[in-house]
Amino acid sequence: MNGFLLLIPFILIRFGLLRMLSKEGLKRAASFAPLIGKEKIAYWSYQISNVLIFVYLFFLKATIDSYWFYAGLVTYGLGVLLCIASVFNFAKPAEDGINLNGLYRISRNPMYIAYFIYFLGCVLLTRSLLLLAILMVFQISSHWIILSEERWCIKKFGEKYKSYMNTVRRYI
């Protein structure tokens, strides 16, 4: 199976489902908080690694002949489910704009976690070390993006967001 086929659910969920649920949510998901210093490098690393994941999967094949396939299938399936749940939660924030429902009660960044698990499933299904390296760059740069988003949320939402940060972990 061509590795690019693994991206179809991601594209449908991330863009199609989110657009169906909330056009405003799609706009929010596409925007980034103001960046300073090394966050700009992280932003470009994030964008480039994102493109590399998509392009490189065109050249990979998922193989069914080993236990990696089953581990990858479970991880990939979990990633799909988490992407769906996080998109549903992201699409409907509270009136003040802070997401506190669903997975956002467990993690302040469930979409980033879902993406990582999803793409880790792709790594396991294709057994590609290069894809794993690209995913690690993607995830490390995501952390810097998240830090800029948190700074922006504190500025926008103030004490309410700080309280949320003290109650809910950044990841899991």
Image (spheres, helix red, strand yellow):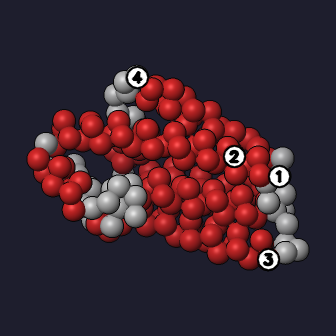
Q: What residue did someone put label 2 on?
A: 133
Q: Which corner quadrant holds the N terminus?
A: bottom right
| Mark earlier in primary sequence (2, 1) | 1
Report, in whole angstroms, how far the alpha carbon at label 3 lies from the one at label 4: 43 Å
Q: Which residue extends farthest left?
A: 159
Mark 3–mark 1 distance (CA, rounded to whole Å):
18 Å
Q: Which residue is mark 1?
A: 60
Can you identify the residue that label 4 sits on? 37
Asked if one can make out residue 156 in the rendered structure from this viewpoint, the answer is yes
- Cα–Cα span, label 2 and label 1: 15 Å
Disc 4 versus disc 2: distance between alpha carbons?
Answer: 24 Å
Amino acid residing under circle 3: Tyr
78 vs 72, left or right, is: left
Q: Secondary structure at mark 1?
A: loop
- Which residue sits at x=48%, y=43%? 142
The disc placed on residue 67 is 3
Q: State yes or no: discs 3 and 1 in contact (Cβ < 8 Å).
A: no
Dot 2 or dot 3, earlier in sequence: 3
What type is the residue that disc 1 sits on? Leu
**CB under 8 Å between discs 4 and 2:** no
Q: Nearer the viewer, residue 168 or 102?
A: 168
* Mark 1 → mark 4, Cα distance in angstroms: 35 Å
Q: Amino acid at mark 4?
A: Gly
Q: Marks 4 and 1: in contact by CB < 8 Å?
A: no
Whichever of callouts 3 and 1 sits on the residue coming sooner in the sequence is 1
